[in-house]
Amino acid sequence: MPNTIILIPSRMAASRLPGKPLLKINNLPIISHVFNKAKKTNIGRVVVCTEDEEILNEVKKNGGEAILTSKNHKSGSDRILEGFNNLNVKDTDYILNLQGDEPNIESNDIVNLNKLMINHNSDIGTMATIINDKSMLSNKNIVKVFLREKLNKNNFPFALDFSRDDLSHKYKNIYHHVGIYIFKIKVLQKFVNLKQTKNEIVSRLEQLRALENNIKINVGLAKFSPIGVDTMEDYLALKKNMEYKLKK
């Protein structure tokens, strides 16, 4: 059975909401909520990769594992590869990159992505959910993934494209992309060493670098679309929602 390690890139210097990894929900920082969701999967070792000692110390204080990385990374993929190399992990086949600002991600979706990746022997895997609200198509804050066929719980088709724009005039099967990735080790090493493409920089979507260098990305169906914390409004809404669920 192939082995997977879950790495969570995290840093304090977010452009729209600096310090968000340490904002608390139910008296626990966001980054520790994500760590706990990853740990719950029982897939394998979970480590937060961060450039900030504040995050490192907080994760460890709450029972998690974390490692310091460089402050010069341009993407989360660069950060997790450095973290993986510094950990000197042996007998690992896949690295799962989990976003550090999505504390309500479903552990079952992470488990299913790992299974799909192994069963299909894929290079890169990610997830998407069904779009029920058509207004999401024109929302540039929502990343869409475009497929040749419809997603179901059993298939794992290749992505044709990713965009923040409404491309419904061009593509038929459109889904809301969920920013979780899993890589074969060698593919992540190759990907990080590739130069950023023009479309990647303009769109702020690093997955376009893979597609434009003929690296295929498979997409699995997620049951739940996690809420990313990009603004104070996002944080307050998610905090209210998660704390309400805990009281029920």
Image (cartoon, rainbow, N blue to C red):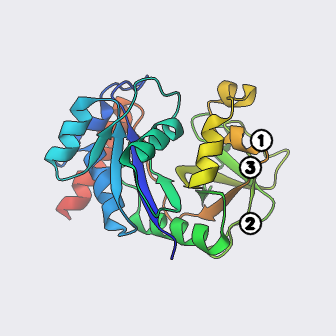
Alpha-carbon distance for marks 3 and 2? 21 Å
Between disc 1 and disc 2, whose residue precedes? 2
Identify residue type, mark 2.
Lys
Quadrant in the picture for residue 206: top right
Residue type of the residue flagged with mark 1: Asn
Q: Which residue is mark 3?
A: 215
Residue at the image position 68 percent from the left and 72 percent from the top = 155
Compute the Cα span from label 1 to label 2: 24 Å
147 w.r.t. 142: above or below = below
- Give the total number of marks visible in the rendering: 3
> Disc 3 marks which amino acid?
Ile
What label sits on residue 177 in the rendered view? none
Q: Give the vertical position of 201 relative to 95 (above or below).
A: above
Which numbered dot is residue 150? 2
Q: Position of residue 30 (x, y in %)?
A: 28, 44
Disc 2, SS = loop
Q: Residue at x 54, y 65 (%)?
A: 113
Residue that label 1 marks:
213
Packing grade of label 1 (10 A; few <14, some 14-19, many >=20) is few
Tag 3–tag 2 contact (CB < 8 Å): no
> Which of pointers 1 and 2 indicates the residue nearer the eye?
1
Taking the image as drawn, is residue 105 in sight?
yes
